Image (cartoon, rainbow, N blue to C red):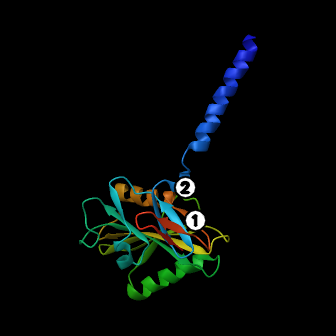
């Protein structure tokens, strides 16, 4: 009798654990949701930073992040940009090399360095493009694999000096939280306007 009660209690605990797991919101929807043609993604705002979709177009991005209380266009503001682009193949190192060559032609004194410690859900190509006392551009390409036809660029621009530990932490937080949702018929329902977007 006692053993049966113990088994029943254990079964009820397991049911409670499974129910909690079933009704927990999916991790993929933690943070902000942004979308474009045939894709959407989620990404989290770093603590004390603001995500801005409206201003992102001026930066050639889908979303940008900057510190709360700052303006992205103000001199000295550190801006993290997230862009989703169509890819032509799976050789992401070629895309990174093409960007490096563009910087070499525009800034003959530019140097490049690997960025250590980048963590991502996808294969990552991180590189620092810099010209001392001029700019420090932290660039990471993410390739979500052949099942997705998109390539992700996450970059952070710091004028004049290298990024601080807090800025690098925010940059890493954006990279680590990024999740791509890719589907040719992706539809978003905009409840505020009663519209369905394709």
In x, y percent, where is residue 173? 45, 56
Mark closest to the chain's N terminus, 2 or 1: 2
Q: CA distance from mark 2 to mark 1?
A: 9 Å
Residue with the most extreme bottom position: 105
SS at badge 2:
helix
- Position of residue 112 relative to residue 70, above or below, is below
Q: In the rendered image, which quarter contains the N terminus?
A: top right
Point 45% across, 85% down: residue: 102
Would you say 165 lies left or right of 145 here? left
The picture quadrant where one finds residue 110 is bottom left
Q: x%, y% of residue 130?
A: 39, 74
Mark 2 and 1 residues: CB-CB less than 8 Å, in contact? yes
105 and 19: which one is in front? 19
The answer to whether any part of residue 46 appears in the image is yes
Helix, strand or loop at label 1? It is strand
Residue 198: give x, y in percent of width and height: 54, 74
Describe residue 102's horizontal placement relative to residue 79 as left or right: right
Disc sitting over residue 181 in the figure: 1
Q: Nearer the viewer, residue 8 or 127?
A: 8
* Residue labelled with disc 2: 28
Q: Residue at x 58, y 76 (%)?
A: 93
């Amino acid at each position: 009798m006692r053993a049966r009660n113990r088994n029943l209690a254990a079964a009820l605990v397991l049911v409670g654990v499974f129910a909690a797991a079933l009704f927990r919101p999916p991790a993929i929807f933690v943070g902000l949701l942004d979308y474009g043609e045939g894709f959407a993604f989620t990404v989290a705002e770093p603590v004390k930073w603001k995500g801005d979709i409206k201003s992102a177009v001026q930066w050639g991005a889908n979303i940008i992040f900057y510190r709360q209380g700052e303006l992205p266009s103000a001199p000295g503001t550190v801006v993290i940009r997230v862009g989703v682009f169509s890819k032509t193949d799976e050789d992401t190192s070629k895309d990174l090399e093409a960007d490096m060559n563009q910087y070499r032609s525009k800034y003959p004194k530019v140097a490049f360095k690997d960025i250590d410690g980048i963590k991502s859900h996808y294969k990552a190509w991180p590189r620092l493009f810099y010209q001392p006392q001029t700019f420090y551009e932290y660039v990471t390409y993410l390739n979500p694999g052949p099942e997705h036809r998109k390539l992700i660029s996450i970059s952070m621009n710091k004028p004049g000096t290298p990024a601080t530990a807090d800025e690098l932490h925010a940059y890493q937080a954006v990279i680590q939280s990024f999740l791509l949702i890719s589907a040719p018929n992706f539809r978003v329902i905009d409840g505020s306007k009663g519209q369905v977007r394709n």
